[in-house]
Every structure is written in structure tokens, then in C-alpha cells.
Amino acid sequence: VLLVREPDDDETIEVQVCPLWFAKPQRIGVKKGDRVKIRGAWAEIGGKEVLMAAKIKRSEHAEFKVRLTSNGKPFWTMSAEELAGETEND
């Protein structure tokens, strides 16, 4: 889970990224104070609105993808072959 705040807003947004067993926070590479762009979809979990991340972009050359943007399929549910096809260009 990432907690993200818009620069000019006091509202904090909860961003669901992926299970810890799939990627530890160090692999995602986001640190407190980083500016990020997040692509994903809104969902309700436990009565709270959260953003389900598909891609987290830290800079022009640094991004972390966890879901297909076409249908939201999580990378951690893919076969090794499917995942290799999605990550070979990273």
C-alpha cells in the first residue's frame, strides 16, 4: 500500500499496489517525498475508496507495472510465460 497526497491537497489516497510476496517496497522504488504518476482504477475495499495501481511512474525511465491496463489482470496471477511477455521491454 502506498499513501499518496496531491501536492496542493491535504487528502491522502490509498493506493493498492501488489502483494508483498510479489514485490517488496524496495523493488517498487518509491520513497517518501517522491513525485509519482499512477495509472489504475478506483475500487471499494472494506468500505474505503482506494486506487488499484496498474503502473507507477517515478520518472521518464523508471516505472513499475503490476497490472495489465487493458483489463486489470494482476501480474502475480500470470504464468511465467505471460509475465515474461509483459516485462521483457522493461
Image (spheres, helix red, strand yellow):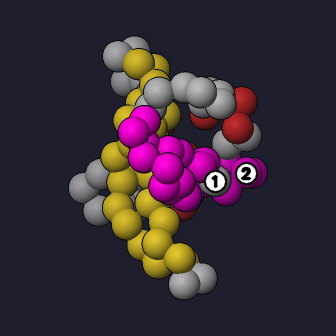
Q: Quadrant of the C terminus?
A: top left
Residue 81 among those drawn in magenta: no
Disc number placed over residue 42 in the picture, else none = none
Crowdedness near tag 1: few (<14), some (14–19) or many (≥20) residues, C-alpha within 10 Å: some
Query: Which residue is painted at 71% across and 30% down in the image?
Result: 26
Q: Residue most toward the bottom?
A: 47
Report x, y in % for residue 89: 37, 24
Report x, y in % for residue 58: 46, 25
User: Could you tell me if residue 41 is visible in this image?
Assistant: yes
Report x, y in % for residue 80: 54, 46
Crowdedness near tag 2: few (<14), some (14–19) or many (≥20) residues, C-alpha within 10 Å: few
Q: Amino acid at mark 1?
A: Val
Query: Which residue is painted at 74% across and 51% down in the image?
Result: 21
Q: Residue most toward the top?
A: 61
Q: Report the span colored magenta.
A: 2-22
Q: Amino acid at mark 2?
A: Leu
Nearest to N terminus: mark 1 or mark 2: 1
Q: Quadrant of residue 37?
A: top left
Q: Which residue is mark 2?
A: 20
**Residue 55, placed above or below residue 74:** above
Q: Which residue is mark 1?
A: 1
